[in-house]
Image: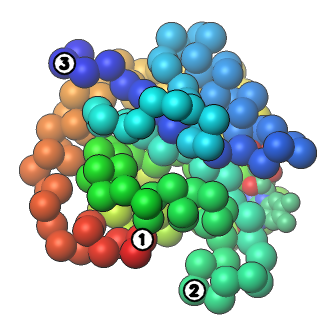
């Protein structure tokens, strides 16, 4: 691997499901994880974003993406360019809206949806993630490098 993978994530402080997923990824896969609000380190190398979905009617244009995630992406062009993929956390009970925030971000930022995790996931999820990072990280980075600079990405979350 040329550059080590990093995962930025946000998690609601009351439920902390994504936080638990991040901690398990860190523990079992040895990948560095950073909470978008608590990390002092700025995104300066390719990373994966992990976000839950919160369906709500507050913002009609963006009814699913947590505001903290939206603001974090809006605040920095580098963050929008360095992202190479998204992992969604959610709840299968939401049916067609399962992990909708992750799907929407992937469309806007032109990056692949790498995996979806129901609540805190099971052993299979972590095995899938391990294989995915081992086999595909370098090509994800290379693919992103080819498309950055696209104006659509610049405006994606603005
Ligand atoms: C008000 C509310 C709306 C939600 N809407 C969705 C949804 O549309 N799709 C989905 O997959 N999960 C939805 N969820 C489930 C959360 O995304 C899921 O519980 C996730 O694990 C929360 O992560 P967190 O604890 O890290 O914030 C919703 C949860 C709440 C409380």
* Quadrant of image for the C terminus: bottom left
Q: Is residue 103 visible?
A: no
Quick one: label 1 or label 3, which is nearer the N terminus? 3
- The residue under the point 29% across, 45% down is 82
Label 2 to label 3: alpha-carbon separation: 38 Å
* Residue tagged 1: 157
Q: In the rendered view, does 20 fall on the left or right side of 15?
A: left
Query: Which residue sits furthest front?
Result: 40
Residue 33 on image: x %, y %: 54, 26
Quick one: label 2 or label 1, which is nearer the N terminus? 2
Q: Determine whether the residue tagged by mark 3 lies in a helix, strand or loop.
A: loop
Q: Is mark 1 within 8 Å of ligand 1?
A: no
Judge depth for marks 1 and 3 and give the one in front.
Answer: 1
* Quadrant of image for the N terminus: top left
* Residue tagged 2: 61
* Residue tagged 3: 2
Viewer-proximal residue among 40 and 58? 40
Other-residue count near label 1 (Cα within 10 Å), few / some / many at <14 / 14–19 / ≥20: some
Q: Is mark 3 within 8 Å of ligand 1?
A: no
């Amino acid at each position: 691997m040329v550059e080590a993978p990093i995962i930025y994530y946000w998690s609601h402080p009351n439920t902390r499901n994504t936080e638990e997923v991040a901690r398990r990824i860190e523990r079992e896969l040895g990948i560095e994880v950073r909470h978008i609000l608590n990390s002092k380190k700025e995104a300066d190398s390719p990373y994966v974003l992990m976000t839950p979905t919160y369906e709500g009617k507050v913002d009609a244009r963006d009814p699913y993406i947590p505001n903290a995630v939206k603001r974090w992406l809006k605040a920095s062009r580098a963050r929008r360019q360095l992202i190479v993929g998204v992992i969604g956390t959610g709840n299968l009970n939401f049916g067609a809206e399962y992990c909708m925030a992750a799907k929407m971000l992937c469309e806007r930022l032109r990056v692949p949806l790498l995996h979806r995790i129901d609540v805190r996931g099971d052993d299979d999820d972590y095995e899938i993630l391990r294989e995915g990072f081992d086999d595909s990280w370098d090509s994800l980075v290379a693919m992103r490098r080819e498309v950055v600079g696209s104006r659509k990405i610049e405006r994606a979350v603005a």
